[in-house]
Image: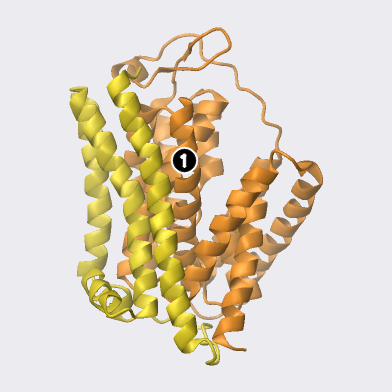
Chain colours: A orange, B yellow
Amino acid sequence: MSVLVFTLLVMVGSFFAGFLGALTGLGGGVVIVPMMVILFGVDMPYAIGVSLVSVIATSSGAAASYVREGYSNIRIAMFLEIATTTGGLVGAALVALKIIPMNALSIIFGIVLLISAYLASRPKGQQQLAEEPDKLATWLKLDGEMPGAQGPKPYHVRNVPTGFSLMFVAGMLSGLLGIGSGALKVLAMDQIMRIPFKVSTTTSNFMIGVTAAASAGVYLSRGYIDPGLAFPVVLGVLIGSMLGARALLVVQTRILRVVFSVVIFVLAIQMIWKGLMSGHS
Amino acid sequence: MSNPQDHSLEQILGYLLRGGVLLSAFILLLGGTIYLWRHGREPVIDRHLFSPEPPEYSYPLEILRAANEFQGRALVQLGLLFLIATPVMRVVITLIIFARRKNLIYTLFTLIVLVVLCVGFFAGIVGH
């Protein structure tokens, strides 16, 4: 196969990954790594590096519109980013310093994939908003207001230390596996910290790019990002996710979600299988 | 919680993010096209076993030097550098927002994040 054909195939595959990722809200990152490893026979470190930069591309593009809508809370984002970026560094270090062998990484990836798919399939129920302010949250000035039908609606943030720790884990998974960890971030903010869903999702999108940038710097300078792979993946995912976001408004997503969930499930099992069978690290 | 000044800064933030991604995508496209033009007909590289990229595709200074000579893959890496820089720039602007609001604690938080980002980048280089 020639470089040209291979590159085009990767771009097409990445386009679909980005498209489906945007449609289902799962993100392209979780599909890129298994796609590269299983479909294109690329070794895992290459896949992680390339997936990570594609995550920066899609999240930065999406985050641009969220800033203007007034839902994302910059203070929460900045405070939690201390946890996510540090976690991202740790995750990248674990890979770059070869502390975690690749076959273990493959298994971890498969498990995280299964959990992400499960989280994404759950109904988006609104958690009870916290009635009373929390001392730590008030001291850190994390509480905020969001646009509401009858004017700004205030909300309170709770369980700050737990949320912070979960964010560290989310960042670490992001750096370790080359994903955005959006699902975990939203979970931590929405369910644990009682931040309203719309604020959680927009703020999470805001944070994903910065978290990925923390680990991407490590990966790039240590030679984990192959330019021949990076350019079709990033471009493919970018175009795919842009179109996917538009399609979201038009297409009936339910059937696609089911299809995507099945695909994710199969990929996850294959990743775990590969990790269990593989000899080298 | 934002006043008109900060609102316009946040608007700049939005344009910055989009612009950064677009610029990077353009450089990626340019570099990728050059790479395919020169190497498109060659048999695809075997990537079954990972080996780190050479310095001209990993060290920022080497990337710049090679990109200056319009080396396709170096240009791609340059595009990626811009891409990685985009959220970093976002943090810098947020730093300015908080500093202007004279919000000491959040200026500090943002500074910490910036330091972590820099540590990651430079540690990667030094550790080679």
Query: Which residue is at the front of the view, A218 or A111?
Result: A218
Query: Which residue is at the front of the view, A171 or A20?
Result: A20
Above or below A91: residue B1: above
Chain assignment, label 1? A
User: Residue at left 56%, top 77%?
Assistant: A7
Question: Left or right: where does residue A19 sit relative to residue B115?
Answer: right
Q: Secondary structure at mark 1?
A: helix
Say whether residue A215 is visible: no
Task: Find disc 1 in the rendering and name its residue.
Answer: A63
Q: What's the residue type where badge 1 is placed?
A: Ala
Question: Left or right: where does residue B88 sit relative to residue A11?
Answer: left
Badge 1 crowding class, 10 Å Cα cut-off, few under 14, some 14 to 19, many 20 or more, is many
Residue B15 is drawn in which quadrant? top left
Where residue A88 appears, x then y in whole percent?
A: 38, 52
Above or below A70: residue A245: below
Where residue B51 appears, x then y in whole percent?
A: 41, 82
Above or below A98: residue A88: above
Where residue B19 appears, x then y in whole percent?
A: 39, 49
Query: Which residue is at the front of the view, A27 or A192?
Result: A27
Where residue B21 appears, x then y in whole percent?
A: 42, 53
User: Residue at left 28%, top 35%?
Assistant: B94
Above or below A68: residue A245: below
Position of the N terminus of chain A by quadrant: bottom right
Residue found farthest to the right: A255
Say whether residue B1 is visible: yes
User: Residue at left 30%, top 68%?
Assistant: A221
Residue B30 is drawn in which quadrant? bottom left
User: Residue at left 51%, top 17%?
Assistant: A147
- The tally of labels here is 1
Question: Left or right: where does residue A277 sit relative to residue A212?
Answer: right
Residue found farthest to the bottom: B42
